Amino acid sequence: MSEKGMNLTLKIWRQKNATSKGKIETYKVADISEHMSFLEMMDVLNEQLINEGQEPIAFDHDCREGICGMCSLHINGEAHGPDRGVTTCQLHMRMFNDGDTIYIEPFRAKAFPVIKDLIIDRTAFDRIQHAGGFVSVNTSGNTQDANALPIPKADADKAFDAATCIGCGACVASCKNASAMLYVSAKVSQFSLLPQGKVEAKDRVLNMVEQMDKEGFGNCTNTGACEVECPKGISLENIARMNSEYLKASITKEA
Ligand code: SF4
Ligand code: FES
């Protein structure tokens, strides 16, 4: 049985470059299969635009399997669209209906300026990571056996869960304050729960939070939209942990 695909109206943010003023443009796509991913639907549109001699829409993507965190689209006002626990590249067209109008915009935050169309600059996240999101351990030939330091299963699980953050920025885009607390707290928590993260714990949290503030992200007011829209289910518990790590570090760190 051959099924007819969906006909859709797409309202897409177009912006030539970082300094130009952008606007929403309207496009039509026809015969879109419900089995396509959202990005495949965008590919169909871009092919159409290229065939018509128009400039294709610039959007970010890399792995297309929910790992790299590049595909950052605001779809109908939601980061990564209407599904839960998935990135834009994992979002399927079956979440939409024939005749729908879909609004597609870049993630919006002062610290994530638009570069072109739907592509934003998320290097602010990289700079936060450089400020402390690492462990300085010499691993050249003198590492301990992995089982030498027992780690409670609950801590290992929480550290692992925090480490699943892919740095997509949906938390920032979903927050009314454009706060990066969920992201930064995941990056702090993945180390603070493990022995190898304890050595630099104070510097890490202080430096990463300082960099976060410098980048112009807003404050957390416990709304929780970040947790709802996070494709990896990063818990707000990480923010509580980061706040307590930060407080401990501020009180006990020598001047
Ligand atoms: S915390 Fe979630 S929403 Fe935020 S950057 Fe990490 S994976 Fe993306
Ligand atoms: S393209 Fe890598 S997470 Fe979507």
Image: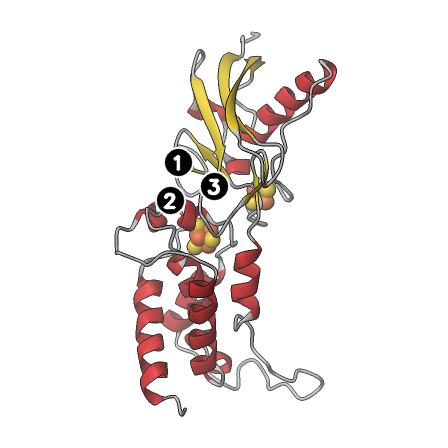
Q: Is mark 1 within 8 Å of ligand 1?
A: no
Q: Is residue 65 left or right of residue 83?
A: right
As drawn, 247 above or below 190: below
As drawn, 133 above or below 231: below
What amino acid is found at the position of numbered circle 3 in the picture? Phe
First-in-chain label (1 vs 2): 1
Report the Cα–Cα distance between label 3 and label 1: 9 Å
Q: Residue at x 42, y 76 (%)?
A: 206
First-in-chain label (3 vs 1): 1
Q: Is residue 250 left or right of residue 208?
A: left
Q: From this viewpoint, is residue 12 visible?
A: no
First-in-chain label (2 vs 3): 3
Instruction: Name the image quarter holding the N terminus.
Output: top right
Which residue is labeled 1 in the image?
78
Residue lying at the far left of the rendered structure: 222
Q: Residue at x 65, y 43 (%)?
A: 62
Q: Quadrant of residue 249?
A: bottom left
For the residues bearing labels 1 and 2, Cβ distance under 8 angstroms: yes
As drawn, 189 above or below 249: above
Label of residue 107 in the image? 3
Which residue is labeled 2 in the image?
174
Report the Cα–Cα distance between label 2 and label 3: 8 Å
Instruction: Name the image quarter holding the C terminus.
Output: bottom left
What amino acid is found at the position of numbered circle 2 in the picture? Ser
Q: Secondary structure at mark 1?
A: strand
Q: Secondary structure at mark 3?
A: loop
Q: Is mark 2 within 8 Å of ligand 1?
A: yes
